[in-house]
Image (spheres, rainbow, N blue to C red):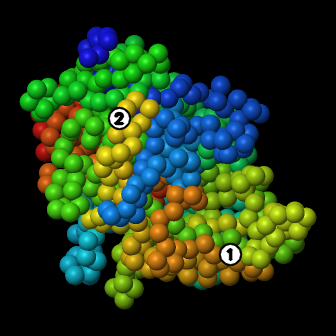
Amino acid sequence: MASSTMKKVDVVIVGFGWAGAIMAKELTEAGLKVVALERGPMRDTATDGAYPQALDELTYNIRRKLFQDMSRETVTVRHGKNDTALPYRQLGAFLPGTGVGGAGLHWSGVHFRVDPVELRLRTHYEERYGKKFLPEGMTIQDYGVSYEELEPHFDFAEKVFGTSGTAWTVAGKTVGKGQGGNPFAADRSHDFPLPAQKRTVSAQRFGDAATRLGYHPYDLPSANASGPYTNPYGCQMGPCNFCGYCSGYACYNYSKASPNVNVLPALRQAPNFELRTQAQVLRVNLAPDRRTATGVTYLDAQGREVEQPADIVVIAAFQLHNVRLMLLSGIGQPYDPATGQGTVGRNFAYQNMATIKAFFDKNVHANPFIGAGGAGVAIDDFNADHFDHGPLGFVGGSPMWVNQSGAKPISGIALPDGSPAWGSGWKQAVADNYLHTVSMDSHGAHMSYRDNCLSLDPTYKDAWGLPLLRMTFDWKDNDIRMTRFMAQKMRAVAEAMGPRSIRVSVKNFGDHFDTVGYQTTHLNGGAIMGTDPRTSAVNRYLQSWDVHNVFVPGASAFPQGLGYNPTGLVAALTYWSAKAIRERYLRQPGALA
């Protein structure tokens, strides 16, 4: 029983990252009274991004100031159904954020759209290679929405983010040939709001080598502003100064797009919007028939239980938290990998990485202390299905890039194989290599499988006595084949750059998922979208099939992982969902599909 009940509002939003902020802005513009509940503290540039305190690697990237407190709430992890899941107690492989802005405050700023093929991935593979090409147990599926439907929302999101980049085609006309555009990119209705950022020395070296090998390098789309900018909401950005403190930090220069910089200042002017922080949502409350939500129950900063009634509930937290809240609230049928029945927890996926460090002679300077999270040069020749998968025996693709984001003095030191691990020899190796190292990544797509899933843990609970989310996850042979192929192609580019040595980090057959080393925070699935309620938790408008006034935006809706970073697609899908709420649901509440 809640100790207090607040006045009913039109919409309550759980979480205030990109998805929550976009939903709040769109629905307040529709005239609705909106309350957003954020579990963490208030975050703002003036406080969390204050210079020079914000440039503190020990506080932010070692002690993890902007990230989730794992002592209060975490996930448990196991490789297979016969293993015992144990809590993820120390942040490593992925870094959920906490506080206003969420992961949208600490992200790097790489701002892709999506390759159209990846929105209809299963259909595309079956059409091109035949139904028998997909490995047994792989459960990839189509999103149920097309690139053409999402394109206006990608376009508007880029205008909100102040994205810098170089277009290839605009309204069918080629504009980026020879200028840093991506020939594999889908057509756009408008150019990027800002021109691409300047290339670092390392990115230019990567691009030149890729060109010599016959590939097609392009400027990464970056939400680190290349110049002064005012977005459609009237929010202002300053030009990025390549300080190198992007991922894991609040940008002190107002240059990196975030909900805090690009949306919240406008929402503060709206009398029908309220943001409550330190609000830990425990459950979505359902009517007796369990077909509609009546609001949410949360704990406030003093630990008091509060009920917030609402006509619409938007679950817009981090991917893992979206799935867990649905399971805790009884929204949708929990997924059972043994039978394949149920939808909530299905198709959990990640991202499939390989990294190369190239070490150069002392006359080649990379200046790794300079950087911006989204700036860089990439190739898409092996992303999506831009190459023939037929003879290769794997599903999935990957962009490859150098995005020099700033090598920090503690965690940013890479050394060649054979270097001493400590002492004076280690110090000399650092001095010899720090200025002459280039890092490049393959950000591979990750497929979904029947037995990689999410569920409630039967043993471990959080600080409030609720079951933790349990992650059952491991790499498959398809993942290893794909990432090793990408590492081989990327190594050829690295060798063409002329280094004196190369260090390759890539998975081997038999390797298990390891939570220790950082990979990405690009977690996907668990509350996936689709056109069939038997295989998806939400419909093509991100509306729960089971509870019609619950909408669930975020990467939890992705049926499988992308080669690209997920933020651009999260934003576009959220705008797409908000449009459906505004134009259809409000006129006639009920199922939209």
Q: Which residue in the structure is indicated by mark 1? A: 503
Question: Relative to residue 502, is residue 454 depicted above or below?
Answer: above
SS type, badge 2 = loop
How far apart, in angstroms, are the residues tagged by discs 1 and 2? 44 Å
Q: Residue at x 61, y 47 (%)?
A: 247
Three-letter amino acid code of the residue under disc 2: Leu
Image spot of residue 120 (x, y percent): 27, 64
Q: Position of residue 447 (x, y in %)?
A: 35, 66
CB contact under 8 Å: marks 1 and 2:
no
As displayed, is residue 137 above or below residue 147? below
Q: Which mark's residue is nearer the viewer, 1 or 2?
A: 2
Q: Residue at x 53, y 26 (%)?
A: 41
Is residue 407 rendered to the left or right of residue 258?
right
What is the x, y in percent for residue 416?
A: 76, 73
Residue 246: % across, % down? 64, 45
Identity of the residue drawn at 16% across and 62% down: 339
Judging depth in this view, the residue of 440 and 324 nearest the camera is 324
Crowd rating for badge 1 (residues with CA inside 10 Å; few <14, some 14–19, many 20+): some
Kind of residue at disc 1: Arg
Instruction: Please give the label number shown on residue 466.
Output: 2
Q: Earlier in the sequence, mark 1 or mark 2?
A: 2
Q: Vertical placement of 263 versus 565: above or below?
A: above
Please identify the quarter of the rendering in which residue 187 is found: bottom left
Q: Quadrant of the N terminus?
A: top left
Residue 116 can be seen, yes or no: no
State the residue at coordinates (23%, 27%): 285
